[in-house]
């Protein structure tokens, strides 16, 4: 029942738009331009931070994702707390936009993987999306340095102001 209702809610407006767009203009009438499709949600990911691995204290996995509208989500499995949890926090759209600009300025769309291998250190993976350029970049590293440290500092600053309601995001 719900599936057919949802289909009807999508199909009927699309049929109306299609029929009005395809109708031939009648004498004395003008052609109506169809406006561009507006995004249904103003929520797109701008950065995802993923820290996973195993240390002498045990295995863990932490993740934080920040969205364009300011939603911050996070999860934490294992690790120092030994618990599994997830939570959310809220930033303003302007704060999310500022975070995005800082990540882009620090090279978030151009950094490659750092292949330096070490032991007893978790792997950090960062993905930065840019809607305007329609580009994204994912890079991973075990030990920060240079631009990697700058990216981590930017994310640490943001996470400190907008802590996710879980045991804690581990950022090296």
Image (tube, grey):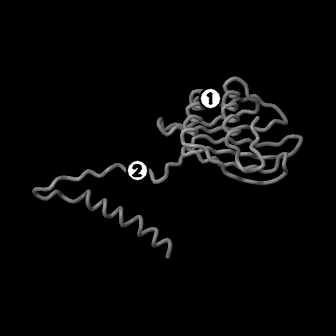
Helix, strand or loop status at disc 1:
loop
Question: Callout 1: 10 Å neighbours few (<14), some, many (20+)?
Answer: some
> What is the number of the mark on residue 65?
none
The quarter of the rendered structure image containing the C terminus is top right
Q: How many marks?
A: 2
In the picture provided, is 18 more to the left or to the right than 164? left
In the picture provided, is 133 more to the left or to the right than 15? right
> Residue 76: x percent and y percent?
75, 49
Q: Are marks 2 and 1 in contact (CB under 8 Å)?
A: no
Helix, strand or loop status at disc 2:
loop
* Numbered disc in front, either 2 or 1: 2
The structure residue drawn at horizontal position 47% and vertical position 35%, both measured from the top left corner, is 133
The structure residue drawn at horizontal position 57% and vertical position 43%, both measured from the top left corner, is 92
Q: Rounded to the nearest whole Å, what is the CA distance between mark 2 and mark 1? A: 32 Å
Mark 1, residue position: 111
Q: Quadrant of residue 108?
A: top right
Q: Quadrant of residue 153?
A: top right
Residue that sits furthest to the right in the current view:
56
> Residue 123: x percent and y percent?
75, 38
Front one among 156 and 76:
156
Q: Closer to the N terminus: mark 2 or mark 1?
A: 2
> Residue 2: x percent and y percent?
50, 73
Mark 2, residue position: 38
> Residue 154: x percent and y percent?
66, 32
């Amino acid at each position: 029942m719900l599936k057919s209702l949802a289909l009807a809610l999508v199909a009927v407006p699309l049929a109306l738009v299609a029929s009005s767009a395809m109708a031939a203009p009648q004498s004395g009438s003008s052609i109506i331009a169809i406006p561009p499709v507006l995004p249904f949600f103003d929520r797109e990911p701008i950065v995802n931070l993923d820290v996973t691995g195993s240390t002498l204290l045990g295995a863990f996995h932490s993740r934080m994702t920040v969205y364009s509208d300011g939603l911050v989500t996070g999860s934490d499995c294992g690790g120092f707390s030994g618990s599994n949890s997830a939570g959310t926090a809220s930033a303003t759209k302007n704060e999310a936009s500022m975070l995005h600009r800082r990540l882009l300025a620090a090279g978030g769309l151009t950094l490659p993987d750092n292949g330096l291998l070490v032991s007893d250190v978790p792997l950090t993976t960062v993905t930065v999306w840019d809607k305007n350029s329609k580009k994204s970049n994912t890079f991973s590293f075990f030990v920060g340095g240079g631009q990697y440290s700058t990216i981590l500092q930017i994310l640490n600053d943001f996470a400190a102001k907008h802590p996710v309601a879980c045991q804690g995001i581990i950022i090296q």
